[in-house]
Amino acid sequence: MPEVITIPAQRELVAKQDKYHQQRVAAYCRVSTELEEQQNSFQMQVSYYTDYISKNKEWKLAGIYADEGLSGTDVEKRDGFKKMIKDCRNKKIDLILCKSFSRFSRNNLQFIKYVRELKDLGIGIIFEKENINTLTAQSEFMIALYASFAQAESESISQNVSWGIEKGFRDGKPKYNFKYLFGYKRNDEGKPEIVQDEAEVVRKIYRMFLDGYSTRDIANIVSEDEAVRTRLTWKSEYGKWKSGRILSILRNEKYVGDIMCQKTFTKDCISHKQIKNNGERNKYLIKDAHEAIIDRDTFNMVQNELARRAAKRKKSDKCITEQGKYSSKYALTELMICGECGSAYKRCTWNVHGKKSIVWRCISRLDHGSKYCKHSPTMHEDKLHSAIIRAVNEYYESAVDIREILNGAVDEVIAGASHHEIRQIEQRLKEIDKARSKLVELISGGEMTPDSFDAEFAALFDEEQTLNGRLTSLRQTAIQTEQQQIDLAIAKEEISQAPLKLTDFDDILMRKLIECVKVISKHEIIVIFKGGYEMDASVEE
């Protein structure tokens, strides 16, 4: 048998050391908002724990860790909390005091994670409100229970806040974020007020876009203006505008005086992650909520132009090659199509015996040879430009006759509008909403049971769904009709100008005047102007 020697425990020595050892005690304080009442509570917590720890002879103050105006559901944003945990890991703290579980954390998983980690380090947490010390054996169940209550309370508060905000949207009370809203500033009432010099930049951006400039070109031009660049709140490190920001200005409904509420929403109160609202929740469009910088006609034209540039579509059913991305460099890239197959024409550079020549060719012929498009001609740019210039000059010279044609077209478009039916449907939808609210009041008041109103609720719902479908269709038709009126109005305005004798090909003017240039043959093109007026033009040899 091996010999075993027992070494007795030095109980008296350990007891003596514990008797004279001062525990290093820290306190953690937090308030979730920066309101004056909460700030007073915060200062009171700090003062209370400083005094409380200092009065206990067995304790030594290890620090007061605090976070002010921060949510308790996310540890990552609480610098005071993270510093306290770091000091615990570095053995600088023996005990932590905290007012309650909810002050420590409202995230159940994070709460239990840190409590257990500190317990493994031999560091206890005393929660005064719940009267629990995490180092005691019976505390584990109570910790899990109270942590769940704290998280549930946070979720309930979050739901109530979200409901209140959404009700404000329904009542026409929007919330503005002025941080990125170029062209506006917050007035004394908290509403947008136009900043005139910035608003002029916004108008310039819209004009340039309709003139055919790309968002990148616009960004480069605006970036050259030092005064504009220094006012920009979301500039890059080099102080330059980016095409993405130009695009956001062009798409932002706030510049026409409207505001779309709840474009994004918070996924949950734990992650605080903002996600895009793709239909998961209601959106609320508040019309004429503030003073507009851009008129509605211009805004609608820009939205249609954005959609047109973004679309990759075939010019006709026979078109095999799809249209490429929008190019702002040459107007004919967007305007010129093949009369045979419907494909777009592309600008090419020929090099014959060292001599360069600029020509335009059908993309289908370039991609597939004569398989789908057998006869489309190659057009020399200089001769093509000359033919289009002659057509434009003739268009101006025939202004009186063309104006009469366009006036007739405007009357035809207006006659086909369905605005009256739209208004009737909108009125009926309001009546349905009021009727539903009345039924809810009767049920809430105990006058009737929900079962007795099932049929009426179902009937209202079915009618509402039918009317909403019809309304969507009519609004789409109205938008198209409105765009037709805008195109016709632009054409009338252009020809009402004093007739000009155009001598040089101007890409911006061509985009304003021309809807399409159709190549019929090597010697003939058809120029279709905005508003639908067509003019044949011969291409000289």
Image (tube, rainbow, N blue to C red):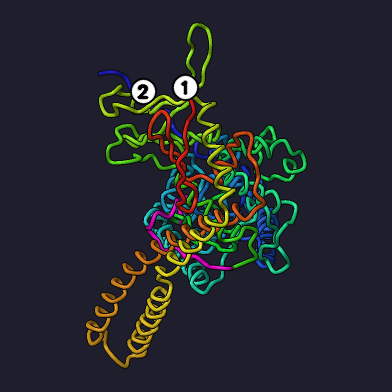
Upstream in the sequence, badge 1 or badge 2?
A: 1
From the viewer's perspective, is 36 left or right of 366? right
Q: Is residue 103 visible?
A: no
Tag 1 near tag 2, CB within 8 Å? yes
Is residue 150 placed above or below 418 in the rendered structure?
above
Q: Position of residue 359 (x, y in %)?
A: 48, 23
Q: Is residue 320 visible?
A: yes
Judging depth in this view, the residue of 305 and 220 nearest the camera is 305
Identify the residue at the far top of this view.
353
- Tell whether position 282 is magenta: yes
Q: Position of residue 257 (x, y in %)?
A: 60, 63
Magenta region: 269-288
Q: Amino acid at mark 2?
A: Leu
For label 1, the SS is: strand
Kindly identify the residue that appears in the image at 23 percent across and 87 percent down. 452
Give the tally of numbered discs.
2
Kindly identify the residue that appears in the image at 49 percent across and 60 percent down. 485
From the viewer's perspective, is 527 left or right of 501? left
Magenta span: helix, strand or loop, mainly?
loop
Q: Which mark is residue 217?
A: none
Classify 10 Å Cα crowding around label 1: few (below 14), some (14-19), many (20 and above): some
Residue behind mark 2: 366
From the viewer's perspective, is 253 left or right of 528? right
Q: Which mark is residue 348?
A: 1
- Tell whether position 26 is magenta: no
Q: Amino acid at mark 1?
A: Cys
